[in-house]
Image (cartoon, rainbow, N blue to C red):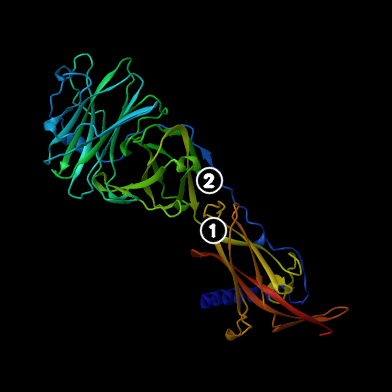
Amino acid sequence: MKKTLSIVIVMNLIFSFAFGLHASANNDVKTGGPPDALASEQVVQPSGEIISELTQATTDLDTSKLKEHQVKLPANLKSASTTSEMHKQQGLLSAPQSVNATAAAETTTYTGYIEQEGTSTYLYPIYVQSGHILQVQMDNPASAQLDYDLYLYEFDMATGDLNPTPIDYSIYGTYLNNYANGSGTLSENVGTKNSTSGAKAYFIEAYGKVGGSISEPFTLTVSTSSTYDTYETDENALRAYPFTVAVGGSTLASRSINSEIDQDWYKITVPESRNYDAMHINLDQASAGNGYKAELYGALSNNRMALIPSTTGNVSLGTGTYYLRVYTTSTYSDNNYSLHFQPVLRADKVVITGYNSNGGSNDYPTYAYGRYYRITGTSFTVTGVAATSDNYAVANAEVEVIWENDYWSEGSNNRYRSAKVMTNSSGQFTATLSLPPSTGSISQYLPGAIGFTHYYDICGVLARVTSRPSANDTDIVYHFAYSIYGG
């Protein structure tokens, strides 16, 4: 660090010396305000936005599995003995393991097996009342050798025949993520809303795309609900709502979690022209207290969804498309949650905007080496601003300010002083350093009616982003020692 800083200072000194001598050959000391180079940097405060509208779009994920898969069971409503029974293929789906009913949602859980690759387990008919929604979740075994998919179909209520084209499908590839409760692959979820005027029947298929097991069961949870937000259903990443995050952050507050298996999905596209490398994602305190989670995923080949680790709410992002799900691990509520996305702007540049010391902030004499700020005393304050390459203010960036005086020997412990500070919400920083006294190694006689000789040092100042040292600004300052009458 010290060697690099010295080189920077020497280069600045050579440049300044070459041009400064001609500018002040008469040795008159002229003072005034900061030069144009230190004029306050004009940065833009990034604006946030409220996401007021969501529109689903065609998925970017791989849907080739749909072309390869066809339901094999010729089901018909008339073949069901009663409308209250769930039909199960070859007894591989157990009777309900639990039933949870509230005023808003009724949820039933089953366990089942897929014994052989390429076979399915079915559950039907599922009746949903007019205006209600159906949500289904399949939790698969945590095995890299198994890949199960989930399909949802509807019956023609006039003929009783099953429509063989799925109305929703969850076709993730198996990818074992590290969750709080252990290793596992993302659950398969589907859903639909009954928009007809009467009750409607549905058909659920759990399909063994890869592998099968007689000892490792899957869990199937079925929920129907009468209350939900206007954007349901979006139970998997293929149904995700896309949106763009504003530079100053975006907030969504029009969604709710209406059942214990409800999943809300969003698609975020990070452009190549981004001015951030990470994003802070958080839910409001009440929702987080209810067990709500917001998780970001990257899509690998075969729709394998890889959980992106979060550090204190920040996730690292590059150019590309990401998928975020909101769900609950505990309770749910009809109250809307507030989901906030805040780009962690990247500080691409630092600009020193001013100085202060005992002589005030406008002490810029023109000595023989040029016009620079003059430090008086041992307290030295440096102000500046950190910004993106497109001039947006960067808040909460750590900036290190270093002062160097090469007239002090290396072993004196007086050659360097530094301080690390954080930028405020406007990208501004202020660092105050306690300096050793000036050595007074340079003298300059100032003629006049009363002549004086000034003694001072030439020092260097460096301000840089701690995490990105290439984002820096350097300058030269004088450190005043004393003056002698008559020279």
Quick one: which residue is furthest to the right in this view?
449
Residue nearest the viewer, comparing 257 with 249:
257
Mark 2, secondary structure of its residue? loop
Residue 328 coordinates in the image, percent (x, y): 39, 40
Please report the residue visible at 31 percent of the width from the left and 40 percent of the height from the top.
60
For residue 93, the mark is none
Confirm or deny contact between disc 1 and disc 2 (CB under 8 A).
no
Which badge, 1 or 2, is on the more N-terminal residue? 2
In the displayed structure, 17 sits above or below 107; it is below
Residue 148 coordinates in the image, percent (x, y): 20, 41
Please report the residue visible at 40 percent of the width from the left and 30 percent of the height from the top.
231
For residue 397, the mark is 1
Please report the residue visible at 87 percent of the width from the left and 79 percent of the height from the top.
450
Instruction: State the residue position of label 2.
Output: 248
Q: Specify the quadrant of the image occupied by residue 112.
A: top left
Left or right, 121 with respect to 470, comes to: left
Q: Amino acid at mark 2?
A: Gly
Looking at the rendering, in which quadrant would you find the C terminus?
bottom right
Q: For mark 1, does the 10 Å Cα neighbourhood hold few (<14), some (14 to 19), or many (20 or more) residues? A: many
Q: Amino acid at mark 1?
A: Ala
From mark 1 to mark 2, how far is it between C-alphas?
Answer: 15 Å
Residue 238 coordinates in the image, percent (x, y): 31, 37
Mark 1, secondary structure of its residue? loop
Q: For mark 2, does the 10 Å Cα neighbourhood hold few (<14), some (14 to 19), or many (20 or more) residues? A: some
Residue 46 coordinates in the image, percent (x, y): 56, 46
Left or right, 465 with respect to 56, comes to: right
